[in-house]
Amino acid sequence: MIALLLALFLALDARTLWQQGAREEAIAERAKELAAPGAQAELRLELARWELAVHRPEAALGHLAPLGKEADALRGEAHYALAQYEQAAPLLDEASVEHQLMKIDALEALGRLAESDAVLARALAAAQEGDARLWSAEGRRLARVGDSAQAVAAFRKALAQDECAGEAWFGLGRALLAAGRDEEGLQALEHHRKLTPLLDQWDFARRAVDLAPLHAPNLAALGDAERALGRLSRAAELYARAVEFAQGAEQLVPIALRQARLYAEDEHDAQGAIERLEQAAKRAPDARLFVRAGDLALEAKDTARALELFERAQKLRPQDAEIQKRLARAREAK
Amino acid sequence: MRRIVVCLALAACGRETPPQPQPAPATGIAFTDITAACGVDFVHDAGKTEAKQLPETMGAGAAIVDVDEDGDLDLYFVQSGPLPIPGTQRAADRPTNRLFLNDGKAHFRDATKESGDGAQSNYGMGVVCGDANGDGHVDFYLTNLGPDALLFGDGKAHFRDATAQSGITGDEWTMGAAFLDADDDGDLDLFVATYVAIDLAHPLWCGERKPGWRSYCHPDAYPGLEDHFWKNNGDGTFVEATKVAGFSDPGGKGLGVAASDLDGDGFVDLYVANDSTENRFYRGKGDGTFEDATLRSGLGVDRFGRTEASMGIAIGDVDGDGKLDLFVTGFDDESDTLYLGLGSRGFDDRTVAAGLEAPTMLPVGFGCVLEDFDLDGDLDLAIANGHILDNIELYNDGKTHAQRALLFRNDGQGHFTSIDGGAFTASPFVGRGLYMGDLDGDGAPELVLTQCNGPARVFRAPHPGTPSLTLRGLPRNSRGGSRESGAQSSYLGQSADEIYLPLPAGPLQRLELAFPGRAGRQTIALDPPIADGVLVFRGEPGALRVEQRGR
């Protein structure tokens, strides 16, 4: 009993480290805990999940080794990450969309197309609303068997779920070309070409967040990528988290400026932008924040507030000619 | 340039139809490592620093080419060395590129000192070969981290640096390059891929800030650069013609380049493998201009529509349908990609059907070669692998810096099976360049692998026992069997411009060559019939002469 309580206490400690973003330390702590007698299988499963999240599939397989079938799905993920598709395919859990996609991909990579297609058919049948990635896979399957018309329909269903689905835009363009609808096909491919660098930027940022999920610049970079893709609510959420975890003015100021830009330019909410800049300035008094807030106030015709904000900026940088110009402009407007 | 040889029909004694390929043996191909025995002791120096600068990861290329015109294949290796960081003094003892001359039996001697300006000492990247000044001798174009170099050869293994007079300028970081006659005027124009803009004086920090964890930055951290096309004036001087010719890819991060008539319309096209940006397919019009046909071709991204970290390129007809196919190596967690040529319908990513998806998913592929290693009549595939990050194990415990090379046997229908390649696949390397050529003159091609910051390796192929024909000196971009001459670029270098064809059905008595749109057809009688040996072609398309040589 004492061992169990101790294990739970220690587990909390490792979990706290994980939640704080100290991933290496959390994993090391949990590995130590597992050496204690009576360590629970759940702790071992959680450790394997953490290890998979930081790209340690070999370690995850090692820690899952003593467990039974309850660990099969995670074993499947680890084998998939190691491109060991023969081992991965039977272990992946078809109840989860992520695992369905992995299984489809693994079987396809092995050239076992009939099995891959069967998993896809089951996944689509089970899906309530559908999933853009599944519909894209269906489009690719249909294109592969030469049914361009149905492939077009499947890719359009994917795009109805997610208009930023790069795979679907590409597949749609190719399927339209195959169907002889060249103009439409090239239009779709042009759209895909424009979208691709944004998706690459997003993917790069996402991987960085995977590695260091509480590192503010990483979160802000992912916010930038989401904003570029037009997914503004996700971008706003990421900027807010980035502001929360930013350490020091060096991190906070540029992030707050980007957050304000989203509010001002995309949401047309100058007031929201100014509020966020002021909140950031409370943590890190920086002239750039007041200047930007003042500019926004001036654009919103709130000259009194603009004047106040520029004056605060001037206190921080008394000799700054740009701030003096802005002050003069605000006074003139008043 | 209009493609000169559309098909090359082989007629054997007593037969009206070309010989059929023999069934492939089930075993591997036991390459042996002959590096030490053959006298090649080149070691690449990446000039590694604590700052982990991206150029240190790229490796450098090599060329397999006959520079002394004695009928055998010599080796030229590109060296890198200390980084040319602005503000630092250039060391007098920088390591140089090196030239090794062959005695015809794969025994080499270091001829760097006699090579004149062949002993370049820049931070080198790649090399391509061709007769740039039309004097009949092989010249080199060298890509560098810094100004490139054009070296004129004299056919006696001696080179003269002609860069200053060539009209070629610029100091960007260049990688792959290709000579091609884009405007069908009989001289070789030049396409050069540039990579990224990097400030070596102010290195970025990537990776975790813990001892040992500093990492090389992803190329996404640097802006891409426009590639360059140089039109030859006919005498080895060039004029910049990138925009006029129709090339445009301002953000591209070019690594591999191949010039080939990929769409089979009789004109040479250009393919650029970009690192993490969309690859480019420029369709040649034969008049020195090109159109960006990437979208319609399907060659820009993989079948998921994703850009890949594309590195090396190999071209050949892998499924025997007469159309050229394209293989491109890529990063980890993305497979290398095989695009099958579909004629007027462009290309399609058929990596899965070819059996290449799973085995190429984890390694980082660089150099690649499509060649008939077992002389059974179809193109097999060899790939050099090696990760960019020398501490990748810290970031992913399933990956390693040094990685095993891969060898695949083709079943003749374009389906590949991974096989044991003897010493070639036995040990992990930090592989970068991979090139082929028959170094010992026995009719079976060897492999030369370059490593990043490590020794180059030479692997001898076992002779399968099948009589074979080596075609040498065919006009550039002419087709011979499943391959196109002069189109094997791989990564940062160049394989031998030779084509190897099995002759299992006995002596060959005539060759029939076809020249669409130019000189029509040409039948060359082989007297006496050749059973196993070398055919050396000379002269103009349509009026080619051939010389027979024994082994």
Image (cartoon, coloured by chain):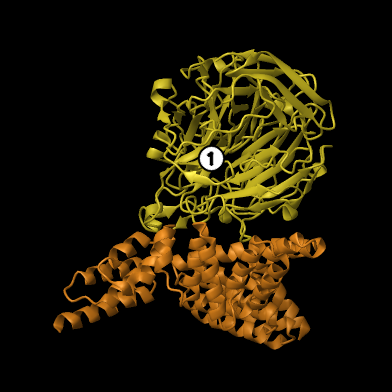
Q: Image quarter for residue B443?
A: top right
Q: Position of residue B121 (x, y in %)?
A: 54, 28
- Secondary structure at numbered mark 1: strand
For residue B155, above or below residue B173 = above
Q: Could you tell me which residue is drawn at 66 percent across and 18 percent down?
A: B536
Q: Position of residue B284 (x, y in %)?
A: 78, 41
> In the image, is B120 to the left or to the right of A11?
right
Mark 1 is on which residue type?
Leu
Chain of the residue under label 1: B
Q: Could you tell me which residue is drawn at 58 percent across and 30 percent down?
A: B495
Q: Position of residue B337 (x, y in %)?
A: 58, 50
For residue A35, above or below residue A95 = above
Q: Could you tell me which residue is drawn at 48 percent across and 68 percent down?
A: A209
Chain A: what color? orange
Q: Image quarter for residue B42?
A: top left
- Provide the residue designation for mark 1: B381
Label 1, residues with CA under 10 Å away: few <14, some 14-19, many ≥20: many
Q: Position of residue B300 (x, y in %)?
A: 67, 53
Q: Nearer the viewer, residue B387 or B38?
A: B38
Residue positioned most to the left? A2
> In the image, is B448 to the left or to the right of B338?
left
Residue positioned most to the top? B528
Question: Can you tell which chain is drawn yellow?
Answer: B
